[in-house]
Amino acid sequence: MCPACDCRGYCSFPAFLYEPSVTTGGDDGQQRVWLSRVEYFRNTDTWHKRKEIVVNDTEMFVSMRIHASCSGSGYERHPPATGPGAPAVPCFRQDIKYHIVCISEESDMKFRVQIVHRK
C-alpha cells in the first residue's frame, strides 16, 4: 500500500453490491444501501440507530445513522420538509466510521482493500 498514490481505479467491486435493486425501485438513480445492524426504539417499528453500508464501483462507506434532535448543525431531515406547514419529520445524524478503497482484485472474488478508520 502506498499512501501517497491514488489507488482508485485499479479494481472495482462487483456490480451487484452497488447497482439499484429491481425490488427497490430499479433505475431511480439512488445508491443501494445495505444495513448490517438496526436498533429499534423500545417496542416499536421505528429504528433508533442503524449501520449503513454504501458501495460504489471502487469504494465502500460504512456509517452509523442515528435519530437526533433537529436543532444544531450537521443534521438532516429525511425526507426533507418542504413549504410552510410541512409535517414534522425525524432528523438524523450520520457518522462515517470506515472508508474502504479497492486496491486490487484477485481471483475468486477476493479483493485487496485499504481501510481508513474515522472517529
Image (cartoon, grey):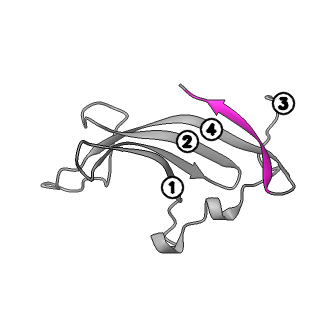
Where in the figure is residue 64, as x and y percent of width and height? 46, 38
Q: Is residue 53 above or below residue 64?
A: below
Q: Which residues are magenta?
A: 109-118
Q: Main secondary structure of the magenta part?
A: strand
Circle nearer the N terminus (4, 3): 3
Circle nearer the N terminus (1, 3): 3
Where in the figure is residue 37, as x and y percent of width and height? 46, 45
The kind of secondary structure element at disc 4 is: strand
The kind of secondary structure element at disc 3 is: loop
Which residue is the site of mark 3? Answer: 2
Circle nearer the N terminus (2, 3): 3
Residue at 55%, 41% in the rendered image:
62
Circle nearer the N terminus (4, 2): 2
Q: Amino acid at mark 1?
A: Val
Rendered image quadrant of residue 6: top right
Using the image, tell me which numbered label, if any, was put on residue 33. 1
Residue at 33%, 32% in the rendered image:
73
Q: Amino acid at mark 3?
A: Cys
Using the image, tell me which numbered label, if any, was put on residue 62. 2
The kind of secondary structure element at disc 1 is: strand
Where in the figure is residue 85, as x and y percent of width and height? 12, 55
Rendered image quadrant of residue 68: top left
Q: Are marks 1 and 3 in contact (CB under 8 Å)?
A: no
